[in-house]
């Protein structure tokens, strides 16, 4: 079974862990590493022979249009990660609509390809944002991958379905939640990011295989370009928990990814979304 491989394209200073430490109005003064790191990801995917979806911040696309063009020219899907990593539940409906439009325009202008997919920063579509999926449907998005169906201190919607579902009645929009597994009645995150870096490789590959074989569904996996960059800056003032989540095992991430990519079948999210659409028809 082919699984969904995705990259959330944002720079090291734009992550949720540092949002109270690094002010948005300081971003222009900070060293950018997103282009070199994303190029390294493109090289890694080329070596592994896989294609993926790159959920890209509009802020990044506006400043690195050549990078966005390289992603599209390499055969990967371009999708939206919003404008500047503002969490959806911090916006109202009008602000969300404006954020979507601004990001989509920047990504499409840079990449020369239509954007049909969206992932909320920090999986921030949840029970507090009942208007978010309807706005995405209204704007013509084919799919969203914006929900983490777990309980977490930064995000989560544990009551939501674990697999593809239609969040808007009468719309073909589908939501593709990041992968979880259920162990002894407890739902565990297993879709990548910090969980993949921090947990043993055996757990991650087992979770993908179990999702495929026991539940007959594709895994939805993600990571960030900064996760393969152990030399990135370390800002002062970040809480210990945030520092541990952000910096632990950066040096082992690239070989660990290559190993996972070789173990399972992978593809772009738009391809997996089309297959899941047929199951929901």
Image: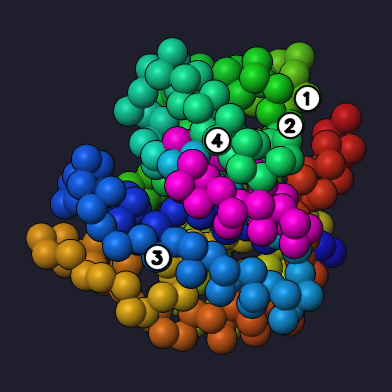
Label 3, residues with CA under 10 Å away: few <14, some 14-19, many ≥20: some
Which range of residues does the magenta coloring cover?
60-83
Quadrant of the drawing holding the N terminus: bottom right
Disc 2 and disc 1 in contact, CB within 8 angstroms: yes
Q: Between disc 2 and disc 1, whose residue precedes?
A: 2
Residue at far left of view: 237
- Horizontal relation, residue 218 to residue 133: left or right: right
Residue topped by disc 2: 142
Q: Locate the C terminus by quadrant.
A: top right
Q: Position of residue 60 (x, y in %)?
A: 46, 48
The residue at 54%/65% (across/down) is: 38
- Looking at the picture, how far across and down is residue 229, in whole percent? 41, 75
Asked if the residue under mark 3 is in contact with the one under mark 2, i.e. CB atoms within 8 Å, the reply is no
Viewer-proximal residue, 234 or 158?
234
- Residue 61 drawn in magenta: yes
Residue at which label 1 appears: 172
| Image position, residue 147 (x, y; %) | 53, 41
Q: Nearer the viewer, mark 3 or mark 1?
A: 3
Asked whether disc 4 touches disc 3, contact meaning CB atoms under 8 Å apart, the reply is no
């Amino acid at each position: 079974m082919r699984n969904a491989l995705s990259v959330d394209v944002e720079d090291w200073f734009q992550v949720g862990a540092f949002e109270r430490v690094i002010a948005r109005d300081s971003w222009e003064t900070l060293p950018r590493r997103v282009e070199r790191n994303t190029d390294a990801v493109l090289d890694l995917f080329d070596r592994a022979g896989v294609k993926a979806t790159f959920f890209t911040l509009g802020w990044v696309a506006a400043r690195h249009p050549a990078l966005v063009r390289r992603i599209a020219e390499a055969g990967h899907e371009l999708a939206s990660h919003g404008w500047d990593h503002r969490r959806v539940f911090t916006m109202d409906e009008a602000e969300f609509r404006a954020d979507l439009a601004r990001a989509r325009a920047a990504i499409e202008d840079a990449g020369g390809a239509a954007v049909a997919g969206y992932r909320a920063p920090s999986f921030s579509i949840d029970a507090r944002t009942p208007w978010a999926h309807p706005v995405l449907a209204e704007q013509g998005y084919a799919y969203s991958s914006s929900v983490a169906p777990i309980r977490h201190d930064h995000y989560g919607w544990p009551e939501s379905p674990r697999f593809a579902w239609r969040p808007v009645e009468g719309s073909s929009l589908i939501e593709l939640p990041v992968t979880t597994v259920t162990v002894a009645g407890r739902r565990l995150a297993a879709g990548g990011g910090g969980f993949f870096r921090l947990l043993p490789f055996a757990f991650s590959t087992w979770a993908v295989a179990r999702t495929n074989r026991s539940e007959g569904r594709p895994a939805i996996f993600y990571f960030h370009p900064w996760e393969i960059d152990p030399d990135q800056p370390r800002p002062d003032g970040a809480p210990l928990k945030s520092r541990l989540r952000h910096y632990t095992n950066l040096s082992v991430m690239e070989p660990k990814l290559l190993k996972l990519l070789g173990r399972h079948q992978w593809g772009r999210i738009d391809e997996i979304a089309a297959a899941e659409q047929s199951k929901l028809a």
